[in-house]
Image: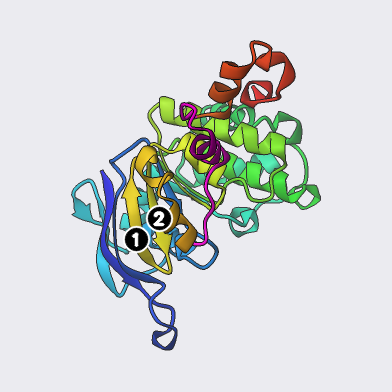
């Protein structure tokens, strides 16, 4: 069980609160979205959850108890709660891809056989087997992001925090990320992600919070949150295109792009490239 209660955080009192009395329960869905424009406090929130920042007030609760920010306690906590930062450079340390993915496992004293198994699985899940022996400094931004995600997946965390996971990815990479999140959620991993990609969030989230200037303006299931035009626009967010179509035409609201196009064309699978093309 993971949640935050009455979190407030400020980098400097003269600039006001980055997070202002924020409470979120991450047990309300398998994929929890934190929606917000740039500067809304999303990345700061993720770092507070990970124990990287100490809030001025409030607490992060894990398994019924507030997390303690000691090295020993965080060491245990971060084996079960992992994060992938928006900028992959923040968590890549080795010069070769497979060595970087294996780093945390080696630090946890996994056997060589188990490390090889976990690294193989992570490379396959991210479709980057071909990068196994590549020097990291030769990779593109999108490739580095996939390596960073693979490094966290190798730990098989109970909770996976993704900060703007599709930033820097091309359309095919974005589709694969959507597929991967759905796959992980179906296997039992709880996902908490931040983004202002409203189409992505609408399709993958089953519960969402709207963060605006450090304040939770709205929370609820997709049918409640993504149809609340006034609050979303006030938070400098847009409506997902599927919601726009519903509001304009009055046709049944589809949850996914695939669901929508399968309604209108029997040849959808042959015409439109979608997540299945990334498998």
Per the image, the residue denoted by label 1 is 216
Vertical position of residue 213 compared to residue 126: above or below: below
- Tell me the residue at 53%/33% (across/down): 249
Task: Report the residue that reaches farthest toward the left.
Answer: 64
Vertical position of residue 151 compared to residue 50: above or below: above
The magenta span reads 235-255
Q: Can residue 98 be seen in this snapshot? A: yes
Q: Position of residue 139 (x, y in %)?
A: 77, 47
Picture quadrant where residue 38 is located = bottom right
Q: In the depicted view, which residue is nearer to us: 36 or 84?
A: 36
Secondary structure state at the residue bearing disc 2: strand
- Tell me the residue at 18%/49% (across/down): 64
**Going from the N terminus, do you reach mark 2 or mark 1 first?**
2
Q: Is residue 200 left or right of residue 279?
A: left
Q: In the depicted view, which residue is nearer to us: 156 or 162?
A: 162
- Tell me the residue at 44%/61% (across/down): 47
Question: Residue 105 magenta-drawn?
Answer: no
Q: Position of residue 273 (x, y in %)?
A: 71, 24
Q: Position of residue 33 (x, y in %)?
A: 43, 46
Q: Position of residue 134 (x, y in %)?
A: 77, 41
- Marks 2 and 1 sit apart, C-alpha to C-alpha, by 6 Å
Question: Residue 238 magenta-drawn?
Answer: yes
Per the image, the residue denoted by label 2 is 210
**Given contact means CB atoms under 8 Å apart, are the residues at marks 2 and 1 in contact?**
yes
Image quadrant in which the C terminus is located: top right
């Amino acid at each position: 069980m993971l949640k935050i209660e009455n979190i407030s955080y400020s980098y400097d009192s003269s600039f006001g609160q980055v997070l202002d009395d924020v409470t979120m329960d991450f047990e309300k869905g398998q994929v929890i979205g934190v929606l917000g424009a740039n500067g809304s406090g999303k990345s700061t929130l993720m770092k507070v959850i990970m124990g990287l920042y100490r809030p001025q007030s409030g607490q992060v609760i894990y398994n019924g108890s507030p997390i303690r920010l000691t090295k020993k306690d965080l060491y245990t906590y971060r084996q079960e709660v992992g994060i992938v930062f928006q900028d992959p450079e923040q968590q890549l340390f080795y010069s070769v891809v497979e060595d970087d993915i294996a780093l945390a496992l080696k630090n946890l004293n996994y056997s060589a056989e188990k490390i090889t198994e976990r690294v193989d699985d992570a490379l396959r899940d991210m479709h980057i087997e071909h990068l196994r022996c590549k020097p990291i400094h030769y990779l593109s931004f999108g490739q580095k992001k996939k390596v960073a995600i693979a490094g966290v997946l190798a730990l098989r965390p109970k909770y996976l925090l993704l900060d703007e996971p599709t930033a820097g990815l091309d359309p095919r990479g974005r589709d694969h990320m959507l597929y991967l999140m759905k796959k992980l959620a179906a296997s039992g991993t709880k996902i908490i992600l931040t983004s202002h990609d409203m189409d992505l969030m609408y399709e993958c989230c089953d519960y969402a919070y709207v963060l605006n200037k450090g304040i939770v303006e709205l929370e609820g299931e997709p049918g409640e949150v993504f149809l609340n035009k006034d609050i979303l626009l006030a938070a400098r967010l847009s409506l997902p295109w599927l919601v726009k179509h519903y509001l304009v035409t009055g046709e049944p609201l589809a949850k996914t792009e695939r669901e929508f196009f399968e309604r209108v064309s029997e040849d959808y699978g042959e015409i439109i490239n979608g997540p299945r093309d990334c498998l």
